[in-house]
């Protein structure tokens, strides 16, 4: 959800001082999600653990 919010802000905000960092945050969030996904795929026993 964080990625989607940051993407929305980066595409709708008129101020580039906000849009640029929001776009950067969206990219970092996507990378974090993909990294966690790879870890969970590598270690199936983690699938039953909490996301918090």
Image (cartoon, grey):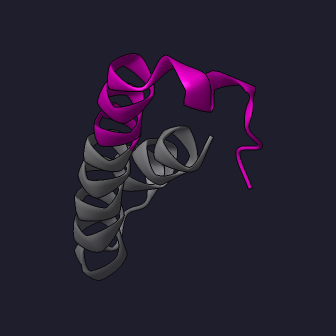
The dominant secondary structure in magenta is helix
- Give the answer, above or below, for where 13 lies relative to 48: below
Residue 9 in the figure: left or right of residue 17? right
Picture coordinates of residue 28 (x, y %)?
Answer: 27, 56
Residue drawn at 34 percent across, 49 percent down: 32
Q: Which residues are magenta?
A: 33-52
Picture coordinates of residue 6 (x, y %)?
Answer: 46, 53
- Give the answer, above or below, for where 19 lies relative to 4: below
Residue drawn at 49 percent across, 43 percent down: 8
Residue drawn at 74 percent across, 26 percent down: 48
36 or 22, which is in the foreground?
36
On-image quarter of the C terminus: bottom right
- Give the answer, above or below, for where 26 lies relative to 18: above
Magenta-colored stretch includes residue 26? no
On-image quarter of the N terminus: top right
Residue drawn at 34 percent across, 73 percent down: 15
12 or 3, which is in the foreground?
3
Picture coordinates of residue 49 (x, y %)?
Answer: 73, 37
Q: How many marks?
A: 0
Residue 17 in the figure: left or right of residue 12? left
Q: Residue furthest front?
A: 45
């Amino acid at each position: 959800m964080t990625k989607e919010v940051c993407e929305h802000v980066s595409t709708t905000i008129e101020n580039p001082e906000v849009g640029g960092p929001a776009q950067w945050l969206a990219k970092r969030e996507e990378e974090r999600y993909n990294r966690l996904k790879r870890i969970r795929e590598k270690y199936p026993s983690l699938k039953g653990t909490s996301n918090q």
